[in-house]
Image (cartoon, grey):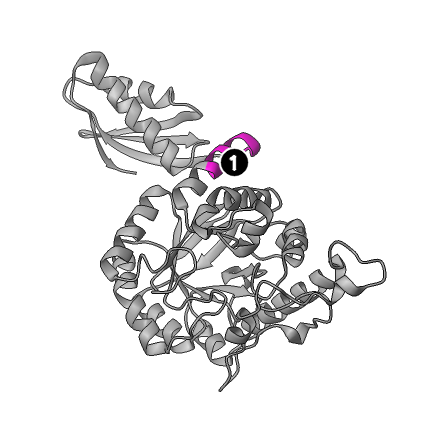
């Protein structure tokens, strides 16, 4: 099955013909990667603004850390942490994902305007399914739990009343089920067919449950849950099988950022110093079909992705520019400046009063395109001494 090209999230049809970067924003005092640096709303909002500037196509906001040994948070407290940040992001027109396993929190945040629910328990709670069914939000279905050794499909963490199986799981999250090591030939890695059989079975079951309640398949994204109750060897098997998982018919998320597994394969102990290794693993996943990259370091990931994608894929975007040339600058100069930008061509022009509208085709993504356009504008000013022309919108 071909890789999904669109992810429908409320009022946004997210174009996945090119991979998108999801910024991770932990509004918690106990995040494993940033030590609560974004716990205060003002700091969280400043970080979110920078992520959008740096190239995030969407922001995943979480009010409960799910790191190994985490302390569960009551839904009211979780919402209290999330509410001011979600309000600001929605007001700014950002695509907002809520990282929560609590249906009441998901419901209240979608009412604020959040367009995605990212549930680490895979929409196994019927109440969370109903929240999704009663909205038009995008849904990230994640697998938490072991996938090898004696694990079965029912070993995955399912939301249950009166118990916190996720908290129990994450206390031993980095170990996974290592029973496969005792097999007769002492394999280096667990059996691929067994791992993928469990993962695919669980993820597809959860997706079909959502669809049965009226959630369109185009709204569903899958996350195999690297690091959640899985050994380093499990994670290797899963990531090497990205192409198979991406062919299930739903967008696939790669969410490895700064995790302990990344430290294992890179030899980097400090979580905050694992960004380079995160980028390497994420690009390998992109090459095999992952289309949403959930990362803490948006700027680094976006730059790496821009370079990787431009040199590996025949991808173009169509951009409409409305420009107002300065008094001493004619339309031909403007068209020529844009047309000579790298990997860019003007495909059509239309003048209306003092506004020039250009239809442009480019192989540059948003940030490199913007910087090339800014350079073209400065070049016109340098050549004839006229002021920079104004952008009326893009």
Q: Is residue 4 visible?
A: no
Report the front residue among 284 and 184: 184
List the single residue furthest toward the top.
Answer: 383
Q: Position of residue 263 (x, y in %)?
A: 54, 50
Principal SS element in the magenta part?
A: helix
Q: Is 314 inside the magenta-drawn segment?
A: yes
Q: Secondary structure at mark 1?
A: helix
Q: Which residue is mark 1?
A: 309
- The residues colored magenta run 304-315
Q: Residue at x 38, y 78 (%)?
A: 104
Q: Residue at x 50, y 52 (%)?
A: 6
Is 336 on the left-hand or right-hand side of 344?
A: left
Q: Position of residue 287 (x, y in %)?
A: 60, 42
Q: Residue at x 36, y 77 (%)?
A: 75
Q: Position of residue 126 (x, y in %)?
A: 51, 80
Q: Is 299 inside the magenta-drawn segment?
A: no
Report the front residue among 95 and 84: 84
Report the front residue among 37 and 19: 37
């Amino acid at each position: 099955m071909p890789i999904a090209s669109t992810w429908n999230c409320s009022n946004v049809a997210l174009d996945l013909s090119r991979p998108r970067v999801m910024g991770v924003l932990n509004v918690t005092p106990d995040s494993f990667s940033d030590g609560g640096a974004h716990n205060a709303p003002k700091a969280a909002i400043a970080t979110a603004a920078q992520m959008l500037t740096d190239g995030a196509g969407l922001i995943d906001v979480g009010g409960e850390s799910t790191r190994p040994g985490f302390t569960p948070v009551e839904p009211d407290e979780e919402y209290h942490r999330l509410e001011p940040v979600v309000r600001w992001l929605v007001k700014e027109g950002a695509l907002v994902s809520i990282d929560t396993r609590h249906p009441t929190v998901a419901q209240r945040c979608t009412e604020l305007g959040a367009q995605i629910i990212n549930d680490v328990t895979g929409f196994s709670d019927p109440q969370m399914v109903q929240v999704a069914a009663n909205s038009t939000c995008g849904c990230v279905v994640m697998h938490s739990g072991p996938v090898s050794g004696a694990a079965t499909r029912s070993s995955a963490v399912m939301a249950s009343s009166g118990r916190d199986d996720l908290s129990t799981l994450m206390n031993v999250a980095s170990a996974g089920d290592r029973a496969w090591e005792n097999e007769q030939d002492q394999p280096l890695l667990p059996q691929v067919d067994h791992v993928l059989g469990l993962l695919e079975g669980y993820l597809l079951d959860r997706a079909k449950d959502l669809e049965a309640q009226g959630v369109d398949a185009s709204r569903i994204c899958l996350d195999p849950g690297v690091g959640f109750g899985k050994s380093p060897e499990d994670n290797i098997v899963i990531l090497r099988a990205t192409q198979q998982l991406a062919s299930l018919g739903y967008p696939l998320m790669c969410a490895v950022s700064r995790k302990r597994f990344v430290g294992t394969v890179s030899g980097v102990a400090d979580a905050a110093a694992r960004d380079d290794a995160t980028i390497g693993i994420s690009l390998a996943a992109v090459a095999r079909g992952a289309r949403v990259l959930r990362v803490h370091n948006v700027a680094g990931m976006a730059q790496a992705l821009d370079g990787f994608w431009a040199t590996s894929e025949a991808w173009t975007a169509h951009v409409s520019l409305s420009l107002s040339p300065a008094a001493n600058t004619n339309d031909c100069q403007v068209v020529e400046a844009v047309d000579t930008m790298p990997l860019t061509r003007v495909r059509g022009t239309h003048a209306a009063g003092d506004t020039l509208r250009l239809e442009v085709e480019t192989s540059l993504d948003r940030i490199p395109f913007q910087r090339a356009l800014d350079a073209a504008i400065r070049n016109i000013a340098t050549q004839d001494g006229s002021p920079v022309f104004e952008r009326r919108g893009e």
